[in-house]
Image (spheres, rainbow, N blue to C red):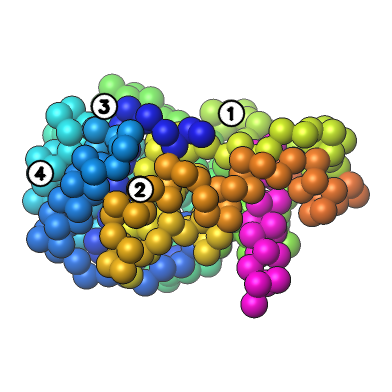
Amino acid sequence: MENKNQSCLGIMVDLAGCPNRCRHCWLGEHRNGCMGAQEFIKIAIQFKRACEAVENGCRELSFFSWWREPDFHRDYRELWRLEQELSSPGRAQRFELLSTWRLARDERYAPWAAALPTQACQVTFFGMEQSTDWGMRRRGAFRDQLTATERCLDAGIAPRWQLFLTKRCLAELDDFLRLMDRLRLPQRCEAIGRRFEFFIGGMTPEGSGYELEPLRIERQDLKCVPRELVDRSRDGLRLLGRPEQEWMAELSQEEAPPGMRAALPCLAVDADGDVYPNLAEPAPWWRLGNLYTDGAEKILQVYQAGVTPGMRANATVPRSTLARRYGDARSSKLYDKDDLICRFMHQWGAHEMAEKT
């Protein structure tokens, strides 16, 4: 299985949580924690010792002081120092992800991030102001995204805008296009030696994102998307995928299992100590155990063996079985193939858990 003999494993600890409850988030809703540096160190030591004790345990580890929102913790500078100290040499990582919540509130944050260096920062929208506030479930979120954009530019960081399309925002797309024009983002990024990127993202239907399925874009909705907006998008509309009915003909013939994989093999520890692999949403059928009651060694053994219900299904249940059970051959909703498989796996997991109760 893919979990064995990995060169490096990431351990993501949700020390502070997230200020948002975004409707598209595949991680779903979790309680925000209030853990500090000492708790982070203790968890890191547990996993280091467990890796030494477990046969074929990963010998190199990357530690992250966040899971959902990077740098949301007030001690983000000290925690980044600890990430470097605790991780195996050269394994501490920064991504093109910053806390836009913090960017809008902490004037020192963008210059600090730029010095790491950070060249780009992802900024998410669900349309214009009301739709973005709705999408992030927080009043003022849209304004925060604009402030974050400005502070990134001031610090020499390129804002990379992503727009999640739903049926809710189709009527706002001309206004969104004018907003980009008014802010002159390509020209201002060029002035700091960067390139402005904008893309139209597709939503993965798991975690909180599964609840957005009634608002998922369908093929007939594409006529409402301005051609100029598509032309400006880095990938056009490719990330939205194809109609489900087209995928059904293909998936109903595939005997291979789902085979969901993580771009970065990681374990995620939430505020309650529950641990999940980042193969998919942190749902009960993927849960590896609890750090405080089971311990890191047992959790690593479960992860290596791949014996959670979700991991077993991911390795054994044919895609054709999932497609026949959960697919809709009449649906014109747009999916990337991997996202549709994620939906099937979410539906399978919810069905399995319901049968056990």
Residue 15 part of the magenta segment: no
Q: Is residue 1 above or below residue 195?
A: below
N-term-proximal mark, 2 vs 4: 4
Tell me the residue that label 4 is attached to: 81
Q: Residue 69 location, x and y as percent?
A: 33, 55
The reply to whether the C-beta atoms of the residues labelled 1 and 3 are less than 8 Å apart is no
- Please give the name of the residue rendered at 18% of the width and 47% of the height, measured from the top-left corner: 49
Q: CA distance from mark 3 to mark 4?
A: 28 Å
Disc assigned to residue 298: none
- The magenta-colored residue range is 336-357
Residue, disc 2: 300
| Residue found 63% across the figure and 68% down from its top | 353
Nearer-the-camera pick, 211 or 273: 273
Residue at the limit of the structure toward the bottom, as seen here = 357
Label located before the other in sequence (1 or 3): 3
Q: CA distance from mark 3 to mark 2?
A: 45 Å
Q: Residues within 10 Å of mark 3 (few under 14, many from 20)?
A: some
Whole-percent x and y of residue 192? 26, 27
Kindly report which numbered mark, 2 or 4, lies closer to the viewer in this rendering: 2
Q: Secondary structure at mark 2?
A: helix
Three-letter amino acid code of the residue under disc 3: Ile
Spatial CA span between label 1 and label 2: 38 Å
SS state under label 1:
loop
Task: Give the amino acid type for the residue marked by disc 2 in the picture.
Answer: Leu
Q: Earlier in the sequence, mark 4 or mark 1?
A: 4
| Viewer-proximal residue among 349 and 294 | 294
- Which residue was labeled with disc 3? 192
